[in-house]
Image: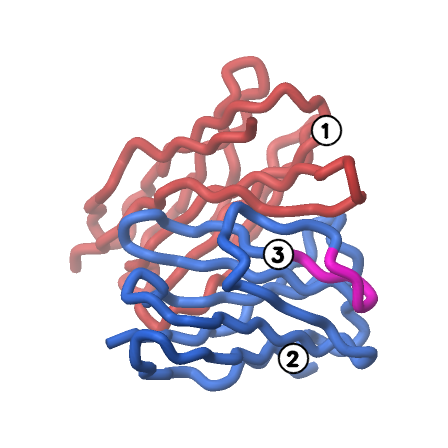
Chain colours: A blue, B red
Amino acid sequence: KAGVTQTPRYLIKTRGQQVTLSCSPISGHRSVSWYQQTPGQGLQFLFEYFSETQRNKGNFPGRFSGRQFSNSRSEMNVSTLELGDSALYLCASSSTGAGHGYTFGSGTRLTVV
Amino acid sequence: AQKITQTQPGMFVQEKEAVTLDCTYDTSDPSYGLFWYKQPSSGEMIFLIYQGSYDQQNATEGRYSLNFQKARKSANLVISASQLGDSAMYFCAMRFVYSGAGSYQLTFGKGTKLSVIP
């Protein structure tokens, strides 16, 4: 079965711009979580969506937002990009969020210049 | 608050030897799950092994085993018969329940970079 698909794989944006990243979960999975990975802060939880509802959000500014569609695909948006937003953004899907069936995508590597 | 500590930033192991990657955790929640992931340079997080807090036996998955010592709050990963393809970053993570909304999130350690030497 197809894995978790994240698009695009690489992105270069200018400070002040906004960006939208996409995540298509494994078919049948209803939970999608997003994580930011940087060399300094490591992996940090951004938010989790389940059946189109945001269930939890990490400690990130309001410039970071997301949504989930009825087909469970999820997007995250970052507005007014800052240099510090340069990171690998990973999404993980699971059927419910419980259990241990998390599958990660290959990530989107965002560079802000 | 949940916390995962990986004290080994980097490790070297000879091919075909076994290696142990350390992980300690801190939580007051009696119900939690512990994970190990492998991240090669491509960036994808690859699931290796899972241990639930109520599991009586240590988890094993092929060449991977988890040495779970609940009282010491440690969950070390043991890789037997190391292969060159095992060279990667390894992350220990804990899942807990954000009880307010029934949400689950993973808390990760800083990772250990494993290098397998021919």
Q: Earlier in the sequence, mark 2 or mark 3?
A: 2
User: Could you classify mark 1 by the number of other residues whose Cα lies within 10 Å: few (under 14), some (14-19), or many (20 or more)?
Assistant: few
Q: Amino acid at mark 1?
A: Ser
Q: Chain of mark 3?
A: A
User: Could you classify mark 3 by the number of other residues whose Cα lies within 10 Å: few (under 14), some (14-19), or many (20 or more)?
Assistant: many
* Mark number displayed over residue B31: 1
Percent of width and height locating residue A26: 70, 75
Q: Quadrant of residue A62?
A: bottom right
Percent of width and height locating residue A1: 70, 81
| Relative side of A74 to A16, left or right | right
| Relative side of A70 to A14, left or right | right
Residue found at x 74% / y 47%:
B103
* Mark number displayed over residue A24: 2
Can residue B83 be seen at all in this image of the molecule? no
Q: Which residue is mark 3?
A: A47
Residue range highlighted in magenta:
A48-54
Above or below: residue A85 compared with residue B65? below
Of residues A102 and A113, the one nearer the viewer is A113
